[in-house]
Image (tube, helix red, strand yellow):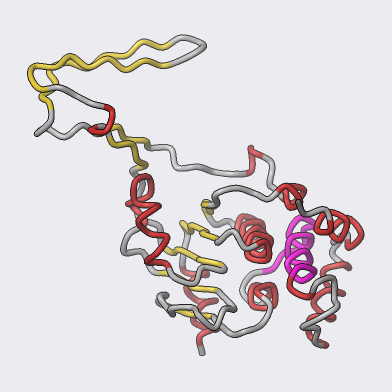
Amino acid sequence: MELDLAKQIISDSKNIYLITSQNPEAIACVLSLFYSLKESGKNVNLIIDSLPENLRFLSPSLDFISYPKNFVISVPESVAKISQIYYEKNPESLKIHLTLENGNIKKDNVAFYFSENKPDLIITVGVQDYAKILPEMLDQYAFLLDSPILNIDNSPDNKKFGKINLTEQKSLAETASHLAGSDKKEYANCLLCALVIYTDNFKKNVTAELFQIAADLMKKGANLKEITENVANEK
């Protein structure tokens, strides 16, 4: 069963990257996974373009987020041969100086990217086609290539690109609730927010199971009033 395989691969993985679409339901859901996986001791990194204004109340504090730390600046040898490198650092900036033996460097010749160990697992949430977003990520996140993918989505157009595909047409929060859990309010808020978005504040797509999940999340401290007020404030 795919769900059992998904639970096992999460359990076996230490370094996990989370990637989400800009769908608000997916963003809230991926944040719930971020909190729960962090709490379980995983090294979790979140890749997201931006948080919508009305979901920023769910955002983790900056000291709770880990970022890739190994940043590379690359100049092709075919463009210029560099004979010396030195830097100067002050409270305002860091300047890196290159002495050229030959050639000429233009801005377009310089590449910037992260260089990290390949993660044990990538979890995508709300992403229909990984091949479409991959070229946009390669400039900075090429080290993500060839890592196994757990694909979580509820779109009928999903391309089933993952090693494991959880792509039933139901709430993303319902799927996520079966994968990882937490008793923390932050986790509960994010997952309940995903449910509120999916059901339009419980006006559609409602099932008995979703009501039960919502009740359990509220017992953990999820604030339905705060969530509905923020979601309704979408700009």
Magenta-highlighted residues: 181-197
The residue positioned 50% from the left and 42% from the top of the image is 67
| 59 falls in the magenta region | no
Residue 18 x, y percent position in the rendering:
52, 59
* Helix, strand or loop for the magenta stretch, by majority: helix
Q: Is residue 191 above or below residue 84?
A: below
Left or right: residue 137 versus residue 11 is: left
Q: Nearer the viewer, residue 55 or 59?
A: 55
Q: Which of 109 and 214 is in front in this view?
A: 109
Q: Residue furthest bottom?
A: 1
Q: In which quarter of the image is residue 101?
A: top left
| 189 falls in the magenta region | yes
The residue positioned 66% from the left and 82% from the top of the image is 170
Tally the marks.
0
Left or right: residue 50 versus residue 85 is: right
Q: Nearer the viewer, residue 134 or 29?
A: 134
